[in-house]
């Protein structure tokens, strides 16, 4: 049995061992297990049953992480992206006023585009057409959006409806929960080098929130038919495509998922021997993208936001994980989380505020925030025009709580930037910009 496993995954070829792969899988699990807590807390704010989101999160994360290991034979874990969760719950549902069923339908349409392009040559052309620094600017804007949500949940930034209007309560219970949560993460991750820092921070803050009386007042998640209540519910919202206000969110979710997945899968394999040197490099990347794309498509059908490859997979890779056995191990551990269902009630959304901010900051270009990373390779590639566009995008998110407006600024800026630089228009940038602008105008008119 041992030899069959080693042969199937090519463990010895990668200079690894079964024990190392199992340990790497456990390390990856510890670093991303927080998502099974955060995802239900956030999406339930949009109206989806907490038990249903918890079930969907575990099933799609566990099953497709295992498939990633068995099919693509890559040590990557998949789970719903925080950026997707937050955008659906707080903007599509919270700001635009769509129902959560329509929100899942919007996610479905965006992932359908992603899935189709994953099997067409168009994917490569689109990826290559986007300037590298623009991809980092897009990620940074998403990061700022997560930071703003963390500040909103902790009441540090005051909101009137969907718009930030100023400083909120800096000394309230929500703010203190955020401060302590960030401190716990920093100590665990930066000082003690502990891999499960975000998860432990959320658990600690959930206990604190319940102790000081700021926990959510909702019935506990439980093993019942409620766990399946969101399965297929997106179908009742499929007519949302007829509403022009949905077009821009569909494009935004597609862009975040599409470029994010490619960047993560390629980035996680850089400077490693994970990809074979025998000519199957592109095949492995393609298989990884296919699994990622199909997982994203299934996610809203089951009842959660889009699943994507998690950057926390790098933790397992650092521990020596080089094959799909690492992913299979992580996937099995994720599925085992289903037995924690009764405890989810005790995790209020405010307990996730520090996690949202920490993840948001990590989405900034490496080197931009010295405290987070000493590697400034990416930041050094930003010339003055790149920094101006990035600053404007971050400022727009900060002042308007709108990722959509930030992307319009980014696309307009880089269309002009590319035209000046190459004396010709980038057709893919122009097309995306036009769709975003039309979708935004449609929102204003309806």
Image (tube, rainbow, N blue to C red):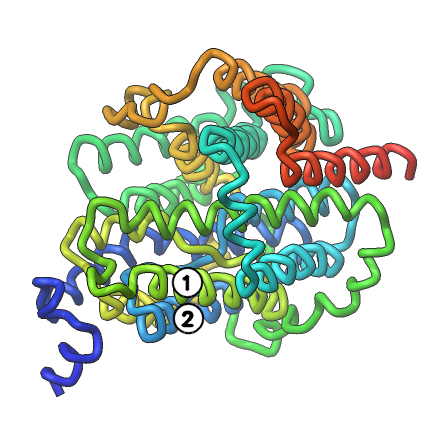
State which quarter of the image contains the C terminus: top right
Image x and y of residue 385, in percent = 52, 14
Image x and y of residue 47, in percent = 68, 54
- Residue at the spot x=24%, y=49% of the render? 315
Q: Earlier in the sequence, mark 2 or mark 1?
A: 1
- Residue at the spot x=45%, y=67% of the render? 291
Question: Is residue 354 or residue 365 the one in the foreground?
Answer: 365
- Judge whether residue 157 can be spotted in this image: no
Name the element at disc 1.
helix
Image x and y of residue 274, in percent = 22, 58
Question: Is residue 338 or residue 88 the one in the foreground?
Answer: 88
Q: Which mark is residue 338?
A: 2
Instruction: State if disc 1 and disc 2 touch (CB < 8 Å).
Output: no
Q: Is residue 298 left or right of residue 28?
A: right
- Residue at the spot x=10%, y=64% of the render? 16
- Distance from label 2 to label 1 (Cα)? 31 Å
Check the image and name the residue furthest to the right: 445
Q: Is residue 232 left or right of residue 361?
A: right
Question: Is residue 28 or residue 13 the one in the foreground?
Answer: 13
- Residue at the spot x=64%, y=21% of the render? 416
- Judge whether residue 151 can be spotted in this image: yes
Characterize the local packing of mark 1: few (<14), some (14-19) or many (20 or more) Cα atoms within 10 angstroms.
some
Characterize the local packing of mark 2: few (<14), some (14-19) or many (20 or more) Cα atoms within 10 angstroms.
some
Name the element at disc 2.
helix
Report which residue position mark 1 lands on: 286
Quarter of the image where one finds residue 367: top left
Question: Is residue 35 or residue 261 the one in the foreground?
Answer: 261
Callout count: 2
Image x and y of residue 328, in percent = 29, 71
Quarter of the image where one finds residue 299: bottom right
Mark 2 vs mark 1: in front: 1
Q: Is residue 73 left or right of residue 340?
A: left
């Amino acid at each position: 049995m041992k030899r069959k496993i080693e042969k199937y995954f090519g463990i010895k070829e990668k200079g690894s061992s079964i024990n190392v792969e199992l340990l790497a899988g456990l390390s990856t699990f510890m670093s991303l297990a927080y998502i099974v807590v955060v995802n239900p807390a956030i999406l339930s704010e949009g109206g989806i049953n907490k038990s249903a989101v918890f079930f969907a999160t575990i099933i799609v994360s566990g099953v497709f992480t295992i498939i990633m290991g068995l099919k693509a034979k890559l040590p990557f874990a998949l789970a719903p992206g925080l950026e997707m969760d937050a955008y659906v719950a707080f903007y599509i549902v919270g700001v635009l006023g769509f129902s959560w069923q329509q929100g899942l339908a919007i996610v479905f349409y965006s992932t359908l585009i992603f899935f189709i392009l994953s099997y067409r040559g168009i994917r490569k052309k689109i990826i290559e057409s986007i300037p590298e620094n623009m991809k980092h600017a897009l990620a940074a804007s998403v990061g700022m959006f997560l930071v703003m949500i963390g500040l909103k949940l902790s009441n540090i930034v005051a909101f009137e409806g969907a718009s930030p209007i100023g400083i909120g309560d800096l000394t309230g219970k929500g703010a203190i929960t955020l401060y302590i949560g960030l401190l716990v993460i920093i100590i665990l991750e930066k000082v003690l080098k502990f891999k499960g820092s975000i998860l432990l921070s959320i658990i600690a803050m959930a206990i604190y929130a319940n102790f000081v009386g700021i926990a959510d007042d909702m019935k506990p998640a439980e093993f019942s038919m409620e766990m399946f209540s969101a399965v297929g519910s997106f179908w009742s919202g499929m007519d949302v495509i007829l509403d022009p206000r949905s077009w821009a969110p569909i494009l935004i979710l597609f862009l975040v998922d599409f470029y994010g997945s490619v960047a993560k899968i390629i980035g996680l394999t850089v400077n490693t021997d994970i990809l074979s040197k025998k000519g199957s490099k592109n095949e492995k990347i393609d298989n990884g993208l296919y699994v990622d794309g199909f997982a994203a498509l299934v996610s809203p059908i089951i009842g959660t936001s889009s699943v994507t490859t998690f950057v926390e997979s790098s933790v397992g890779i650092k521990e020596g994980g080089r094959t799909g056995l690492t992913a299979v191990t992580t996937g099995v551990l994720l599925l085992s989380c289903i037995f924690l269902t009764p405890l989810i009630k005790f995790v209020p959304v405010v307990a996730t505020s520090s996690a949202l901010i920490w993840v948001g900051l990590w989405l900034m270009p490496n080197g931009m925030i010295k405290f987070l990373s000493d590697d400034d390779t990416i930041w050094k590639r930003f010339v003055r025009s790149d920094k101006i566009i990035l600053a404007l995008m971050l400022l727009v998110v900060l002042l308007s709580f709108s990722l959509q407006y930030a992307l319009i600024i980014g696309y307009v800026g880089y269309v002009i930037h590319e035209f000046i630089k190459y004396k010709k228009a980038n057709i893919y940038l122009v097309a995306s910009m036009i769709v975003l602008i039309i979708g935004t105008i449609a929102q204003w008119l309806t």
